[in-house]
Amino acid sequence: FGGSYAMTSREERLSDLINKAGGATNYAYLRGAKLTRVANASEKKRMGDVIRLMSRQLGEVMMDSLGVRVEDHFTVGIDLEKALANPGSTADIVLREGDVISIPKNNNTVTINGAVMVPNTVSYMEGKNIDYYLNQAGGYSENAKKSKKFIVYMNGQVTKVKGSGKKQIEPGCEIIIPSKAKKKTNMGNILGYATTFSTLGVMVASIANLIKK
């Protein structure tokens, strides 16, 4: 049952909350579950540090155009499937006041975005590699950074594509192809850097998490 639930312990975990809500339905896509968390002061500082670093690399004008800013909330990459299978494990993370867990329905699509000929969303085909999905988007554009492609999952996790990518592609994921930097900046380049606004926000939060001390 969706809704708001009071925390009864400082050690309350993902599995505890899902059990309170009556468990997941048969239509739930657990691997796509996402946790949105209210940023505290230190997390906002880290995001600010990342944005300042990006500003030095891309320039303040581009950053303003992209609308990148320190957000009050950020996405925490979770694996709800593992958390429910192993209560109390490292995957079953401890919750904080204000956390929001979203569990989507099964999404049998893959989105291809960034420096491709025609950004597209297509049906997920089990066993197909990265080249198959790139072909569905017309292949790389001429300014594609082919070796830097990565995948953003529905749960907020981000990973670099390794090899054929066959084992990394999942239903609901987004394949991103970054574009090469150019001296002159125009709207096309900005879209190449940003791909989608939601992805950019995930990247900022992910990098901020990596530099956590």
Image (cartoon, rainbow, N blue to C red):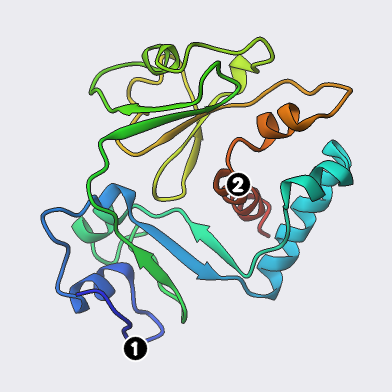
Q: Residues within 10 Å of mark 2 (few under 14, many from 20)?
A: few
Q: Nearer the viewer, residue 113 or 57?
A: 113
In the displayed structure, does residue 74 sit left or right of residue 162? Answer: right
- Element type where label 1 sits in the image: loop
Binning the other alpha carbons within 10 Å of mark 1 as few (below 14), some (14 to 19) or many (20 upward) gives few
Left or right for 189, reference 99: right
Q: Is residue 99 left or right of residue 193?
A: left
Depicted 2 relative to depicted 91: above or below: below
- Quarter occupied by residue 72: bottom right
Identified by mark 2, the residue type is Phe
Q: Mark 1 sits on what residue?
A: 6
Residue 210 located left or right of residue 155 = right
- The image shows residue 109 at horizontal and vertical percentages of 31, 33
The vertical placement of 22 against 188, above or below, is below
Q: Position of residue 139 (x, y in %)?
A: 50, 11
Q: Residue at point 65% right, 50% down? A: 204
> From the image, which quarter does the N terminus lie in?
bottom left
Count of numbered labels shown in the rendering = 2
Instruction: Identify the mark at residue 196; answer none if there is no mark.
Output: none
Residue ranking furthest to the left: 26
Q: Quadrant of residue 129?
A: top left
Q: Position of residue 184 (x, y in %)?
A: 88, 24
In the rendered image, residue 147, in percent from the top left (x then y), is placed at: 60, 17
Please name the amino acid that badge 1 sits on. Answer: Ala
Q: Which mark is residue 197?
A: 2
Q: Residue at x 84, y 37 (%)?
A: 57
